[in-house]
Amino acid sequence: MAVLISAVMGSILGVSPLWIGGALALFSLAPRPQGVLQISLFDLGRPTGSNPGAGGGIDSEIILIHNSDIDWPNYPTSVNGIISDDIPLKAGKFMHRFYLTDDVIEPMMKKIKGGNRDSGGYEVGIKGFHPAMEEAILKWISNFGYEFSGIMIFQNCASSKKYLVGEKCNLVHVDDIQSKWGSSVDKEKGSDFTFLAKQSSPWSIYTGAIKYDPGSASW
């Protein structure tokens, strides 16, 4: 087809078809505009297992990584929704657990619309309940209730997958804290937390290492 086009255009323009063919070849190698979808559409079949859409089963070990502890110049890129390399941390810095009661943890993700088709993103986050009002949680709220920004990991206990929320320029923050003291023993005493990020892509599956502080008392 390229040879035929070169011959026809050469005849019309009165130049050698070789010149036309060379120009077409160079055009084909030119970089495409950024933002154009480069991956081919693929089939999306049913997940394996007898009950793939069941909720729950989220491990209570929510993991937080503070923005200032991350070695951002070496931060890995998500490839097709998977981050397979370890999250790089600065020297002497670690990931930290944040306990939320198992059966109340609610991961959430929704597409958010922009002003036009060329803008928008995803709102992703976690809701959950931390029981009691001990010194440790009050200290955490006092120091990080307004100040925390970073990324977070949560684990699906049933599938052993780890999911990562937050991006380099779109970090997770504490969107809401509601503390309550139940009026009777069967009512909750503790704090509801909502961690939230508005980012350009959905949450990623993380297959890298989890790096805890070996001297932490939360083991």
Image (tube, rainbow, N blue to C red):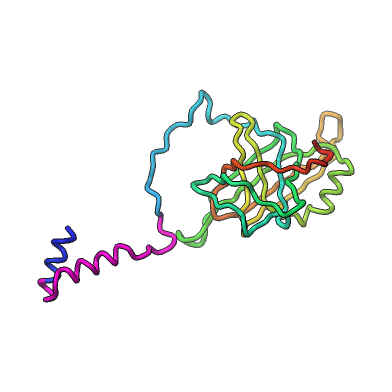
Q: Is residue 67 magenta?
A: no
Q: How many marks?
A: 0
Residue depicted at 13% across the width and 61% down the height = 4
Q: Position of residue 79 (x, y in %)?
A: 50, 48
The reply, left or right, for residue 153 in relation to residue 179 is: left
Residue depicted at 76% across the width and 38% down the height = 99
As drawn, 50 above or below 12: above
Q: Position of residue 70 (x, y in %)?
A: 69, 54
As drawn, 19 above or below 124: below
Residue depicted at 66% across the width and 40% down the height = 154
**Magenta residue span:** 11-37
Q: Is residue 29 magenta?
A: yes
Quadrant the N terminus occupies? bottom left
- Which of these two is toward me, 158 or 217? 217
Can you tell which quarter of the image residue 23 is in? bottom left
Can you tell which quarter of the image residue 68 is in? bottom right
Quadrant the C terminus occupies? top right
The reply, left or right, for residue 51 in relation to residue 132 is: left
**Residue at far top of view:** 50
Residue depicted at 62% across the width and 46% down the height = 86
- Which of these two is toward me, 41 or 186? 41
**Residue at far bottom of view:** 14
- Which of these two is toward me, 70 or 187? 70
The reply, left or right, for residue 14 in relation to residue 169 is: left
Q: Position of residue 201 (x, y in %)?
A: 54, 52
Q: Position of residue 127 (x, y in %)?
A: 69, 42
**Residue at far right of view:** 135
